Amino acid sequence: MAARPPRVVAELGRPETPQETADRKAEQSRKHRERQTLRNLIGSLVACVAVVALIVLLVPRSDTPIERDVDVASVAAQAQVGVDQELAVPELPEGWRSNAAELRQRATDGITAWYAGYLTPSDEYAGLYQGLGANPTWTAELLKNTIATGVATIDGVPWTVYDNRESDADVGNARYGLVAEAGESTFVLLGTATPDEFETLAAAIAPAIAAQR
């Protein structure tokens, strides 16, 4: 039987040489390995995603948002040690909750302030600052870019009002503020709460302010 003539490769227009045949088979083998590696990589990725999804489904979750509820009175009692001025601890109606309470010291001048942060019934922010031996610079720093717009007397305490809710200036959280002084303490209330809510907070600390006069 006559030997079959070598196969003509269309791209070459002639039969392959032994070296060309070896190179072609090596290239085919390399491409096969690359495709196999890619398939393995994709398979591993799919498996990882499936495991993560399973964990997410199995871990119990609550739809209730996590909110801190700080016991301001308890924190104040601990902070009161070594502080001469009485720290203001407001008794607020239902719907108010505190998410922070602490003594803060400003690095620039060492002024210490008692701070309590609240979320109001309307889910707005109201911060209470009591500067201990504070100066006008301390107050101005808290109410940066705001201006006094009037005065108000709440439960016998005169307050300077800073109503900047309509201001285009960058006043941060100090959209509304109240400032009062008594003894060696300066009280600053500021935040995004409504004027009525600030009046509630101011009335709640009126006894503490009166005690320092």
Image: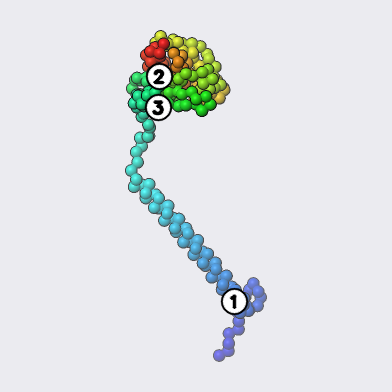
In the displayed structure, 82 sits above or below 14; it is: above
Q: Is residue 154 left or right of residue 19?
A: left
Residue at the location (37% across, 20% down)? 89
Q: CA distance from mark 1 to mark 3?
A: 80 Å
User: Label 3: which residue?
Assistant: 101
The numbered mark, 2 or 1, whose residue comes first in the sequence reads: 1
Residue 192 in sight: no
Q: Is residue 46 above or below residue 3?
A: above
The x and y percentages for residue 186 are: 46, 17
Which residue is at 49% across, 64% downward? 36
Q: Quadrant of residue 125?
A: top left
x then y, percent, for residue 162: 50, 16
**Front one among 211 and 191:** 211
What residue do we see at 40% from left, 13% from top? 212
Amino acid bearing label 2: Asp
Identity of the residue drawn at 45% across and 23% down: 113
Q: Earlier in the sequence, mark 1 or mark 3?
A: 1
